Amino acid sequence: MRVLFILFLFYFYTYTEAQQYYPIDPTGKCEQYIGDSVITPCNSIYVSSTANQSTAMLSLNLYFSLLGGSSASCQNAYTFATLCSTYLPECEIFIDNSTNKEIAMPKRVCLDTCNSVSKNCQITSYFDCNQLEPISKLPLFPKESSDYNLTTYGGELNYRLDCYDPPKSNETTVIGYCPFPLVFRNRTIVGKGSDSLDNSENYGYTYVSEDSYCTIPCPAPIFSEKQWDNIFDTSDAISLVSLLCSVYLFITYMVINPKRNKYDYFFSFFVLSIILMSIAGTIGFSVGGTRKLLCPEINRRGVYTDPAVAAAGWIFQFAIINAILWFSINSFELWFQIKFIKRKLHLIKFYILAVLVISIALSVPLSAIGEFNAGLGNFVVWIESGKYQNWFFWGPLGIVLTVGTTFIGLVIWEIYKIVSSTNKSDFFKLQLKPLMNMLLIYLTFVYLFGYNFYIHNSLNGFYGSSEEFKNCIISTDGKDCRIQGPPYSSILMFVFCLRIYGVYCIALYGFSPKTRSIWSNSIVFNNSMANKLKTLYISSGTTKGGTSSTDIKMSTNNNSNMDSGGGKSSSMEPDEIILR
C-alpha cells in the first residue's frame, strides 16, 4: 500500500507540474466591436491590458490587403471569420462568485483552422500558425482548447475553453480592397479563364490571378510614374518631329520634284512608310496622348475593341513592314547599280505590287483576329502574342536583315574595289549618303531585333520578381514597389529606334544641294506671287553696294543652274522613269 501511495503522489505531482495553463489578465475585458462592415459584427471582443481594438485593426488591415489580391476561393466567410478572430478574438466571461467580478478570457482560433486558411490563401510564408504567445510561450493557436486555472477566482483547476473553428462556408465575401498599386474591380467568377462571365481579358483588365478581384495598374509598375511620363512624352515628341520631317521629304521628292528618277520613287515610298509609322505614333493625340491611348483607364490597357488602338496597331504593322521591304529593295538596287554600272533594272512596278501584297498579308489577318493591343509594360500598340510576333514580324524582319546585311556588305566591298583600283574618291563621296542611310536604318533594325530576343530571354527573370513585389506591397504603402522589367534606358532606346527614321532621312537629304534645287525650281518659288516678291526684294537692294538689279538676276540664275546640276543622291540620277 505504501508503494502504491508513493506512486500516486508521484503521478499527481508530475501531472500537475506538466499541466500548463494560459495566464489570466485580471485587467482584460470584453468590449463591443467597433469596426466596420468588412467582417460580421461581433457582440463581444476580448481586449487585453496591453492592446486595443484600434491597434488590432492595423494588423488586420495588413492581412486584408494581402487577401485582397488572393484568389476568390480564399475570399469567403470562413477565411475572414478566422482572420478576424485571430486579432479580435471572441470573449468568454467567468464570474467570480465571491466578488461578482467578471474574468475575461479570449477564445483562440484552432491550429487546424489556421493551417487550413493560410494554406488555402497561400500565405504560409507570411504567417506562422505555430507561433507562441510572447509571455506564456504557449501556442497562439491551440490544437483543441485553452486550459485555465481558475481556483484563485473560485473556479475549476482545469477550466477548458474550446478553440474557435468557424462554420464552414464557401459563400464568397468580396472585401472590395486591394493593396496599392493594385486596383480593385468587382466581377462575377464562375470558373477559370474563359469561363469568367465578364471575360475581362478581352476588355483589357489583367487580374493578378484568374480568380482574383485585384487588377494590375496600367502602365505596369515597372517604372515610376515620372519615368513612364518621360517615355510617353519622348515617343510623342519624336513621332511628331519624324512626321513633319518625312512629310517635308515626301513633298520634296514626290510632289514638287519635276524630274523624278526611280531612286526618288524608292526613297519616297520608304519615306511614305515612315509617315505612316509616325501617324501610328501620333494617333494618341486624338484621345489625349499616348498614355490615354495605351491606358484608357487606370487599370485597363487599350485593346483591339478601342477604335484608336485598332487603327494605331494596324497602321504601325503595315507601315513598318513597308519600311523594311523598301529598305531591302534600296540595298539591292544600290549594290546592283554599283556592280553593273551600265545595266538597268526596271522593276519598280513589280516592287510596288510585291510590297503591297506582303504588307497586307502580314497585317490584315492580325487585325481580323484582334491581335493589336496595348501592352501593360510597353509604349506602343502592337502584336500581343509572341507567337504571332514571330510569324508576322520578327521572322520577316530576320529575313530582310539577312538580305540587307548581305547587300550592304557587297556595296561596301564594291566601293572599296573601285576606289582602290582607280583612286576615284569622288565616287565614294557620291555613294556616301545612300550608304549612310542604309547603315543607320540597318543598325536601328538590328537593335529592334536584338532587343526582342533580350526581352524574351529575360521573361523568366522578370516574372520571378513577382514574389518580391508582393512582399513589398503588403509591407509598405506600395508607392516604391516595382516589378522587375527591362532597364529604363533600353526602353528609351527602343522608343528612339522606332520613331527616329524621319529625322535620319532629313538629316541626310533634307538640306542637300538636290533638295535645295528642287525647291528653288518648284512652283512654290516660281509663280506670279513669288516672282513679285523676288522683284520687290531685288529692287530694294539696287541702292545698296552699287549693284544693279540686272547683275543680281544673273547671279541668281547662275546659282540656280549650279544647284540643279549637283548634289545627286546616287550615280543613278539620269535614270528617269514615269509611272503610268
Image: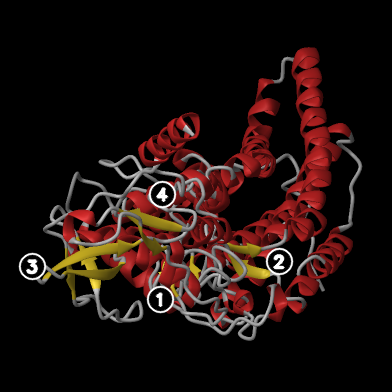
Earlier sequence position, callout 3 versus callout 4: 3
- x and y, in percent, of residue 154 in the image: 19, 61
Tell me whether circle 3 and circle 1 mark residues in contact (CB < 8 Å): no
Residue 515 vertical position relative to residue 74 in the rendered view, above or below:
above
* Apparent side of residue 250 relative to residue 128 in the rendered image (left or right): right
Earlier sequence position, callout 2 versus callout 3: 3
Residue 321's disc is none
Give the labeled residue for mark 3: 99
Report how far apart the C-alphas of labels 2 and 1 lie in the structure. Answer: 46 Å
Tell me whether circle 2 and circle 1 mark residues in contact (CB < 8 Å): no
Instruction: Kindly report which numbered mark, 1 or 4, lies closer to the viewer in this rendering.
Output: 1
Report how far apart the C-alphas of labels 3 and 1 lie in the structure. Answer: 44 Å
Viewer-side residue, 490 vs 285: 490
Give the labeled residue for mark 2: 318
Residue 223's disc is 4
Image point (44%, 49%), residue name: 127
Image point (45%, 42%), residue name: 488
Report how far apart the C-alphas of labels 2 and 3 lie in the structure. Answer: 89 Å
